[in-house]
Amino acid sequence: MRGLARKADELIDRAVNRLVWRTAEEEREVLTDVPLVTFTFDDVPETALTNGAAILERHGARGTFYVAGGIASRVERDRTLISREGCRELSMRGHEIGCHTFAHRKLRSLGADLEADLERNAAYLSAAGVEPPIRNFAFPYNAAWPLARPTLRARYLTCRGAGEAINRGKVDHLMLKAVEIRQPEAYARSATRWVDDVAATPGWLIFFTHDIADTPTQFGCTPETFEHLVAYSAKSCRIVTIGEAVALLGWEGASR
């Protein structure tokens, strides 16, 4: 029964995401002659800092790390999540910190508590030494919720989901699409095809992943594969954070 409930929950998420993409107003345009690639991390396991950030830095690039303060420092069976000190270190090294809620729960389960949850995450990051404001958001479990849009619109410049697509033309800035880097390892390495795509027809390709470890979870990849993807992207594209892309695309001054 638990498996059936989980499957039903996932089906609801997919249906809602499709509804949002189909009905939401298209409020931003991706106009760029230079192909843009962004590497983002959800939950932010420690290895996203120790391996992921270091690899990006070797190529003169930075990433966007979406932190959920309520699960920070948690030790799990196959990963440990970033600490306050780690958040501060990422920020000091020039990486961007984004919001992933505090409780790391789907927005539809937070309901009227969403605003308080986002405030709590902002307070956590401020106490960790991350300079406000936090301007970009990623949906936990990549699950959007239409009723949350007014709150998100008031607080953030962008929200990122999944969608397995490149952002081109007119896009919903509160539901940006992204491509997952995950297991199996051969699949993760094949993500270079997306880089070839955006290099041939410029747009904004956003990758997302979790841990960068020698023995990754199903939601991450090895340091060797991540190095391969970053190096490959750097050859033909400009690697930017979410915030840097927003500035390059001229979205910062747009009305929300």
Image (cartoon, rainbow, N blue to C red):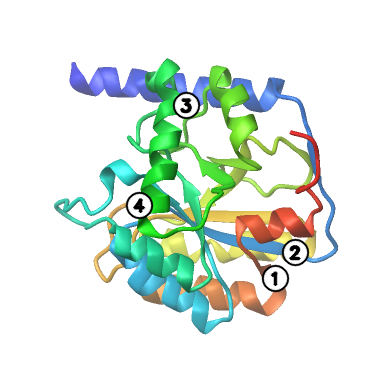
Q: Are marks 1 and 3 in contact (CB under 8 Å)?
A: no
Picture coordinates of residue 232, whole percent (x, y): 59, 75
Name which residue lies at 54% across and 22% down.
148
Quarter of the rendering occupied by the C terminus: top right
Marks 2 and 4, the one that precedes in the sequence: 2
Reading the image, the residue beneath label 4 is 219
Q: Which amino acid does label 1 sit on?
A: Arg
Rate crowding at label 3 as few (under 14), some (14 to 19) or many (20 or more) other CA atoms within 10 Å: some
Which is nearer the eye, 128 or 80? Answer: 128
Marks 3 and 4, the one that precedes in the sequence: 3
Quarter of the rendering occupied by the N terminus: top left
Which is nearer the eye, 190 or 201? Answer: 201
Q: In which quarter of the image is residue 60?
A: bottom right
Reading the image, the residue beneath label 3 is 115
Q: Which residue lies furthest to the left in this view?
A: 77
> Taking the image as drawn, is residue 142 in sight?
yes
Reading the image, the residue beneath label 2 is 35
